Image (cartoon, helix red, strand yellow):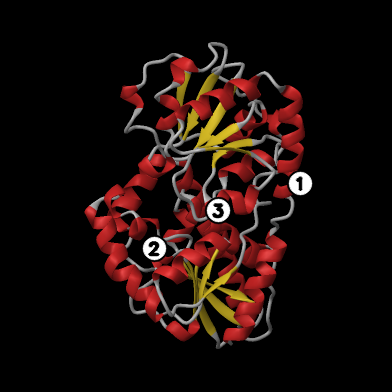
Amino acid sequence: MILIHQFVILILGIIFLIFISIIKCNKFVFSFFKKKFQNKIYINFPYIYKDLVINIPLLSLIDMRGIGRLAKNIFYKTYIFRNQISFFYPKKNIFLYPTIHHVNPNFNASKSLIFILDIIPLQFPKRYDSLVFKDWNNKFSKIIRSSNHLYTISKTSKSTIENFFRGSEISLIYPGTDHFSNRHLTLRNYVSPASNYFIFLGSTSVNKNIEIILNEFEKIDKNISILVIGDSASIESKYTNSRIHFMGFVTESHKEFLIKNSLFIVCPSINEGFGFAQFEAAKFHKPSIMSNIEVFKELWSNRGFFCDLDQPMQWVNQVNHLAKNKKKLREMGLKAHLNYKKFTWEKTISSIDKEIDRII
């Protein structure tokens, strides 16, 4: 009977992974799910890990943002790669929330591990829709104050959250970054829209700040183009320069192909809790030009190029300089790659294991 249950769980897991793959590859389906269900329903996917049942929110596994990456990799590394067949049905339950966005308001504080990447909407409410701020100011703030086991993913976020929520204790667990695909990129013949380009990865929200570069693009070397990869619908009509290519969402393999053949990437974010884009580039020995915010300096000190947020010409000059300095790009690309290799999921899961043991 027990083995039959284990088999059923395994089959359901495989079906669920296929479902996730379909959802995350279709931006229209994802947008529908996000609009209709995000923060409205709370469905957990239970699976056996060691001698207990872990419950993880379904919606976190189909999220296409950084929080979705964190959720999927925690799930993959525990469920697929470290899942152990037990000879009895576990009676112990815990709830693992890779993001605060999908925590049930009626959660069990003593049995829940909750990750919170940042509190940017609370720090800068004017940048966000009033409904987003309302969620953070009410529901999410209440969860933070009542949780027994809170985790974040950088020293900068830990300090910010603890200063904002006096008395709340946040533990630090760095995420792994070695989850980016190891597939052979030569299996697909993708075509780049330009031959000499750099990349921006992410949404074009105010916080990501890509317009600091796009607004000055006429001053960038005429032989250089930019590929904007991600949701850019809100700004595409503003920029008609033929060297600005809005790619929208692309598949993982296509994205990796484009990164591998790029010069570098840019990350002009105003705030971040961590920032996965630089690690995606660093896997392929590509360095980043990034804003000199605290979290980027924490993670990339002496392993990237930094510019001030209020100095657009610094970005223009740095882009123009690096595009012509291949030696500098190779040197910093190597440093970036070595930094990328430090953040492994083996370390992350080991830290989560210790926290699970502490709770149970």
Q: Residues within 10 Å of mark 2 (few under 14, many from 20)?
A: many
Q: Nearer the viewer, mark 2 or mark 1?
A: 1
Q: Which mark is residue 295?
A: 3
Distance between mark 2 and mark 1 Cα atoms: 32 Å
For the residue pair 152 and 24, the one nearer the viewer reads as 152
Residue 43 vs residue 195, the one in the foreground: 195
Name the quadrant of the N terminus.
bottom right
The label number, if any, that marks residue 338 in the structure image: 1
Confirm whether residue 247 shows in the render: no
Residue at the (51%, 33%) spot, across then down? 200
Residue 19 position, x and y percent, is: 48, 53
In the image, is residue 264 above or below residue 156? above
Q: Amino acid at mark 3?
A: Val
Gap between marks 1 and 3 measured at Cα? 18 Å
Q: Earlier in the sequence, mark 1 or mark 3?
A: 3
Extreme residue toward the left, this view: 130
Image position, residue 315 (x, y; %): 52, 29
Tag 1's secondary structure?
helix
Of the residues under marks 2 and 1, which one precedes in the sequence? 2
Q: Amino acid at mark 1?
A: Leu
Question: The residue tagged with tag 2: helix, strand or loop?
Answer: helix
State the image quarter where residue 5 is shown: bottom right
- The circle drawn on residue 225 is none
Q: Which residue is mark 2?
A: 101
In what element is the residue under mark 3? helix
Q: Where is residue 328 drawn, in percent x and y?
A: 73, 28
Image height of 35 relative to 43, above or below: above
Q: Is residue 328 visible?
A: yes
